[in-house]
Structure formats: C-alpha cells, structure tokens
Image (cartoon, coloured by chain):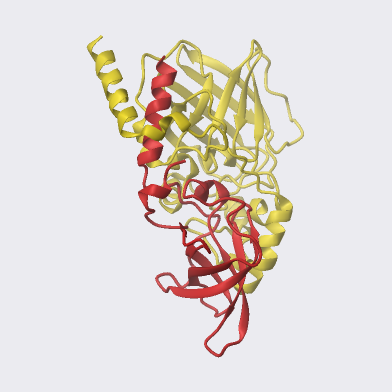
Amino acid sequence: MAKRVFACAGSLAVLLACPSVGAAQTWNGPGLNAQQFKAIPPGGPAPRRDLTGIWDAGPGGVGGAAQEAEREAARAPFTPLGEQMVRANKPGNGPRMVPVAEINDPLSTLGDPTGFPRLVNYELRGVQFVQTPRQVLMLYMFEKRWRVIWTDGRALPKDPDARWYGYSVGRWEDDYTFVVETIGLDDRTWLDNSGSPHSTALRVEERYRRVSENTLELTVVIDDPKVYTKPWMARNRLPLRRVPPDTDLMEMIPSASEAQAYQKVISSQTK
Amino acid sequence: MKETLLGVVLVAAGVLAVSAPAVAHHGAATFATGQEITLKGTVTEWIWANPHCFLKFDAKDDSGTVRQWAAETQNPVAIASRGWARSSFKAGDEVTVKLEPVKNGAPVGRILSVVLPNGQTLVAAGPQPAAAAAP
C-alpha cells in the first residue's frame, strides 16, 4: 500500500512538472530511448503464461558498435565453411565493417527481408505479442513484419523448404518461460549487422522469461553446426520493457527503392 | 490504472529525455570524423527513408561554383524524436547545414545539424536540446 501511495505521489509530481503530458503523442512512436527505457518501473508480479503486450528493448534491442563487439566475443569459432561464408559478407557494422561503397548487406543494399534471427539479434525494436489458443503472434515494428509461433503441439516440419522467417513452434517451459524453436531458415540472410552467416541447417532457440509485469528477458541461442563449431548465445537475457497498450509505433520499412536511392546518391559517391 | 500510471511515467521520461537511439546501417570509416564544415545552400530534395534520410542541396564553394551536395542523417525513427519530420524541408528552402564530409572530397557528408529558414535548428547527432526532445 505504501508503495502504491509513493508511486501515485511520484506520478503526480511528474504530471505537475510536465503540463504538456495531457497532449501526449499517440501516433508514430519511435520506441524507447535509454532514458525512457530506464524510467519504466518493473511493475507487479509476472502473470502466468502471458506475454501479451507491446514490448521494447530500447537501444539494447537495436544494437550498435559496442553490442556487435559483444556478440563477436560471444560467437563460437567458424567452421571452415563458416570462414568461407563470412569472407563473402561485407557489412557496414561490427568487426568486419567495410567502407560504405563496399557494403553488400542484402538488407540495406537490396531491400531483402531482414529475416530471422537478425530481426531479433539487431533490429529488435518495438514488438507486440498476441496470444491465441493456437499461436503466439509476434508483430514487429521493424519491417512491419510478423511471425507465427505455433503452440498447438505440432512438431517442427521435417526437411522444410527454407523461408525468410523459418518455421517456429513454442511451449511454456514453466509458468514464466516461453521457449521458441525455429528451423528452415533461408541462408541468404545474415544473423546480424556484422555479416555473420548461417546455413539452412540453422536452429534457433529463443527463451522469453517474464520476470515481472513490465519486464521480459530474451535469450537467443544459435546452433548451426555447418557454420559454427558449437552453439552460442547471440542474446543473453536482453531486457525488454512493456509499454502502454495504446502505443502506436512508427513504420520502419527498409524498402528496395529507398535502398537504391541511397546507393545512387550517397554510396556511389564515396568510393 | 496501472497502465495509466505507466503511461504517465513513460511520457514524462520522453519529455525529459536528452538523446534518442543512435544507430546507422554503417560505421563511420567513410567520413572524416571530427571535421566539420558549414554550408549555406538551397534545398533541392529531402528524402525521408531507411536506412538513412538524406538532404540534397546546392551550395557554392569558395570559388563561387555551385556544388550539388547530398548529406545523410540517421533513419526516420532515430531522428523523429529530435524534431525531424518528412515535412521538415521543401525544395527552395534556404538552409545552413553543418556536416562531416566524406574523406574522398566528394560533396557528400553526414549531417550534424541544419538551421531552417525560420531559424529553428534541427540536430541530427550527439546531445540534443531538451526542448526538442519532447515526442
């Protein structure tokens, strides 16, 4: 009770300090910056078997040079095939970064889909989770893309045709941990913005742990024995915060025509 | 009620925020980082796009020759909370652009800030004025 009174008093103080709060923007939210992310309280206890809501990892979801360096440190060594594959990738970020004109990132130069798991490894911006009796739907701000995680007990397909976002099934490991397994991933996509490659043998495990009402933690394990000598963690308990349910997120769609315009106007002149 | 309180805290944090997520699809190797030039020019086109927005403008060099510049910013999501919008510029606007040029001497750069015809300054990188931070 005392905590509630304190929270109300704090919110009142915030309201008084910010008379423009009543005119809050309700459209085109760009997602949480670092300060906004930190300001969201943990909230009450985690509900059982429930991921529903709009979640945002703030700058930690989007990455950057420091995060790419961390991921590179966590990465398992390449197999000989992996060494060969990574040499062909010319990324704009990370330890293998090349000058702008040499980048061959299929996302930023061709407008290819980000694909999975890059969508959660680097461009994890706002994402809404919706639970139905048979599925968990993941609706991503980046690319305005969605994934279907089947929870109806089906097995993953055997030897499936590769897809940009693969085939996913999910299960509750306990009341607060949702585990997703994904296979059948198109090897034209990268794992991250550093150009880390993968094969169609890639298997990805995501673990979503509901820590509290407003906090979720994401761990992503990469298992691709053709490209990496052992499984490794691309995300290690990345925290996400729940944002208000009336949050409208901006579109962030890397279109092919915009990629071409950038190549023509900027990249081509930097050689 | 809890959601309302959460909303209040979130919005208040937005008002107080001083920076936005800064991410680009490429690193800084192509640009002469730390070198700044200021150009007065006339906007020819403003492209609101991913992975970078970019501004095309004509500006005279020291010899009086008009050069056609193209200067990028971050993506729309990253700069929207700094006050930038799809409607920030129109062709013919007289602007003052502070930028980091590319190393090879081409009329290309990365925008640091732009002063609009009405005197407003849009900041593209680094700390931003608190007044421009309110979403």
| Residue A204 pos. (x, y %) | 57, 33
- Residue drawn at x 57%, y 73% as measured from the top left: B41
- Residue drawn at x 64%, y 60% as measured from the top left: B90
| Residue A148 pos. (x, y %) | 66, 24
Work out which residue is located at the far right of the displayed protein and give it.
Answer: A161
| Residue A132 pos. (x, y %) | 64, 13
* Figure quadrant of the C terminus of chain A: bottom right
Where A144 sits versus B122, above or below? above
Where A37 sits versus A271, above or below? above
For chain B, give the colour.
red
| Residue A41 pos. (x, y %) | 34, 25
Q: Nearer the viewer, residue A199 or A7?
A: A7
Q: Nearer the viewer, residue A95 or B114?
A: B114
Work out which residue is located at the far left of the displayed protein and give it.
Answer: A2
- Residue drawn at x 71%, y 59% as measured from the top left: A260
Where A37 sits versus A189, above or below? above
The chain displayed yellow equals A
Q: Is residue A73 left or right of residue A125?
A: left
* Figure quadrant of the N terminus of chain A: top left
